[in-house]
Image (tube, rainbow, N blue to C red):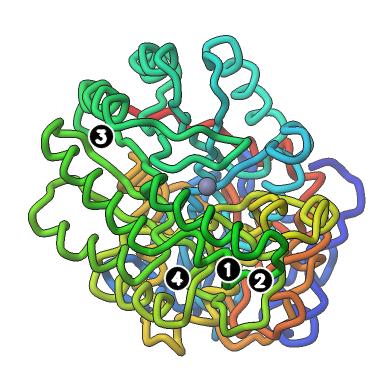
Amino acid sequence: MGEEKKTPFIPDFFRQTLSTFVPEWVKSSKPAPAGEPGGKPLLLKGGHCAIPHQGLIPLDVKIRGTRIELIGENLSDPQALTVDVRGKVVMPGVIDPHVHLGLFTDFDTELVTETRSALLNGVTTLGLYLGGQDSYLDKLDGIISKIENTSFCDIFIHLVILTRRQLEEVPVYSSRYGITSFKTYLCGIPGLIPEVEDDFLLDLMERVSGLGPGATLNIHAENYRIVQRATERLKRAKPFCESLTDWEGSHPAIAEAEAIQRAAFLSRETGARIYVVHVSSEEGIQAARDLKPKTKNLFFETTSPYLTLDLEQDLDLLYKMVPPIRRRKDQKALWQGLADDTLDTIGSDHTPMSSAQKKTSVNLWEVPPGYPAVGTHLPSLLDHAPRNGLPLTKLVEKMCASPATIFGLYPRKGTLLPGSDADLVIVDPSLKKEATPQAAGSRSDYCLHQGKVLKGWPVAVIKSGQWLTPDTLDRARRSLGARYLRRG
Ligand SMILES: [Zn+2]
């Protein structure tokens, strides 16, 4: 890391509230060499480790190089840089399995700005969707090398499959690039993404299941005819509209429930392993709950915005998304779905947009869907989980271990075990702080929950063994060695 003076990455809130938590080397402005080859080990002492499926346990963590070396009681090592993390929760780095980049601004820019936003806020690994209707074969080498050269986070790729050519190439994407998850849309996004019909869906399921037991087809599950019918009715009645409630009306929950049932039915026919993205409604959850006991290899995701935002809050068109943000009863059903394991994972569906890009129109029907969500993903859930009765360990399971397991990254990612990658987040569960675009750190000039005080924030992030602070983050990007995660 050279001789240059390092300003330690200590957010203001951290300085104010965590005097006992500031490691000596930070106080003296010395760089943290942990994580570098030959560097000293890093020892986190006195914290509570949130270990998925085990609980919240008082344990110390020793990190050497880019891996966790040891977890145990009363660890000591005179050689190590020791950090007192009493009163804090040490959890695995969050895996956000659902992120889009480059849809509204160029990909290269967002690969830097948005992975930075993620890492600042505790998300160390991203599942990135790549879309379009062309073959990916001439693009993937370039994208993977960009990831390894400019990203702050480790990234695995899901490929959107919409055309026959892409479908034929699925085995090549898998063998050449280690891509084992694909996505298709039973309801598209008009003007942006077409939907596929059931014959295509069946062919794609067969193709994906032919790759082997770990390969997964991710499905945007809404019945597009039902959505079209509802949308056309509402548009006729209200050609100019500013209400998110009408947006919710244009995407009826039965469209989601029907498509989930159809997808699960067809997956049983084809043996495909399927993962339904962004379940948003009570009806969707109920369908999922009914299907799970009788369908093998069926997984469900919801998103942090659906768990933390609802139509009873006064939300404007900056919050337009597909599927829509729904009612409080839907949100309650989603929390219940996490508690009873109907839902497996939580993503963010991060689609970075500026407020100007949202406000190209003031008419609901013309506003593009999407919002920046990865920067508020962890804090918004830390804030909402306790009041919805979800234990922290369960939340960590859904945000870390479960996406890692489903997408073939466990136990390297998603947990705290000796040998796992040293990607960790240190959380102060009682820290209250306002959600601001600056804290979220996206290129977007707005953030979800903006102006609200959330309780529970990451206070430090360790990526590939390196203790990161806002000031060292940019310099550290190269040495973080962000990786493209090949699977299968
Ligand atoms: Zn999405």
Q: Is residue 57 above or below residue 96?
A: below
Residue annotated with mark 4: 60
Q: Are marks 2 and 3 in contact (CB under 8 Å)?
A: no
In this rendering, the answer to whether 229 lies above or below 313 is above
Q: Earlier in the sequence, mark 3 or mark 1?
A: 3
Q: Is residue 421 above or below residue 482?
A: below
Residue at 70%, 72% in the rendered image: 23
- Residue depicted at x 79% and y 64%: 446
Residue 363: x and y in percent read: 75, 59
> What residue is drawn where x is 44% and y is 35%?
195
Q: Amino acid at mark 3?
A: Gly
Q: Which residue in the protein does label 3 denote? A: 214
What is the CA distance from the residue labelled 2 to the residue labelled 3? Answer: 42 Å
Q: CA distance from mark 2 to mark 1?
A: 5 Å
For disc 3, the neighbor class at 10 Å (few under 14, some 14 to 19, many from 20) is some
123 to the left or right of 345: right
Residue that numbered label 2 is attached to: 243
Q: Is residue 79 left or right of residue 386?
A: right
Residue occupied by mark 1: 246
CB atoms of marks 2 and 1 within 8 Å: yes
The disc label shown at residue 414, or none? none
Amino acid type, mark 1: Asp
Lower sequence index among marks 4 and 3 = 4
Per the image, label 3 sits on a secondary structure element best described as loop
